[in-house]
Amino acid sequence: FEMHENRTLWRIETDTFAPYADGHTVEKFWFDKALDWIVYISHEGSIAFGGSELIAALKEKWPDWAVNLFP
């Protein structure tokens, strides 16, 4: 699913999933039906990920992930 800050909600296909900030919506969220994972983009341009399987996959594919964490 994709949800914007105004609570507009769309069902999207995961094979075309590409999180992005479009400049029109300040906050965006993407998550699955079971709420096992979430991706959040803020109005400040930060992106956050949640869900143990998603985090494990990101760490595996992104070796220097830790240098991108906020203190």
Image: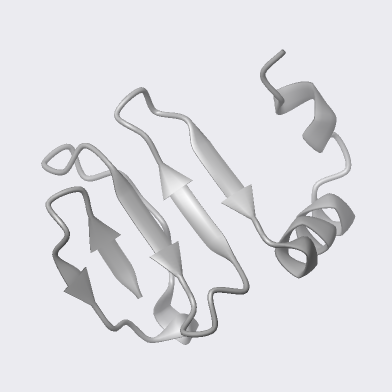
Colouring scheme applied when the structure was drawn: one colour
**Residue 9 location in percent, x, y?**
20, 71
**Residue 40 location in percent, x, y?**
45, 48
Vertical placement of 54 versus 43: above or below? Answer: below
Q: Quadrant of residue 44?
A: top left
Q: Residue at x 41, y 57 (%)?
A: 19
Q: Quadrant of residue 13?
A: bottom left
In the depicted view, which residue is nearer to us: 37 or 69? 37
Vertical placement of 57 versus 15: above or below? Answer: above
Vertical placement of 24 versus 32: above or below? Answer: above
**Residue 52 location in percent, x, y?**
78, 62
Q: In which quarter of the image is residue 42?
A: top left
In the depicted view, which residue is nearer to us: 37 or 21? 37
From the viewer's perspective, tell me whether residue 24 is left or right of residue 27: left
Vertical placement of 24 versus 31: above or below? Answer: above
Disc count in the image?
0
**Residue 28 location in percent, x, y?**
31, 50
Quadrant of the drawing holding the C terminus: top right
From the viewer's perspective, tell me whether residue 61 is left or right of residue 9: right
Q: Which residue is drawn at 84% across and 60% down?
A: 56
Q: Residue at x 21, y 45 (%)?
A: 22
Quadrant of the drawing holding the N terminus: bottom left
From the viewer's perspective, tell me whether residue 17 is left or right of residue 55: left
Q: Which residue is drawn at 80% across and 47% down?
A: 62
From the viewer's perspective, tell me whether residue 35 is left or right of residue 29: right
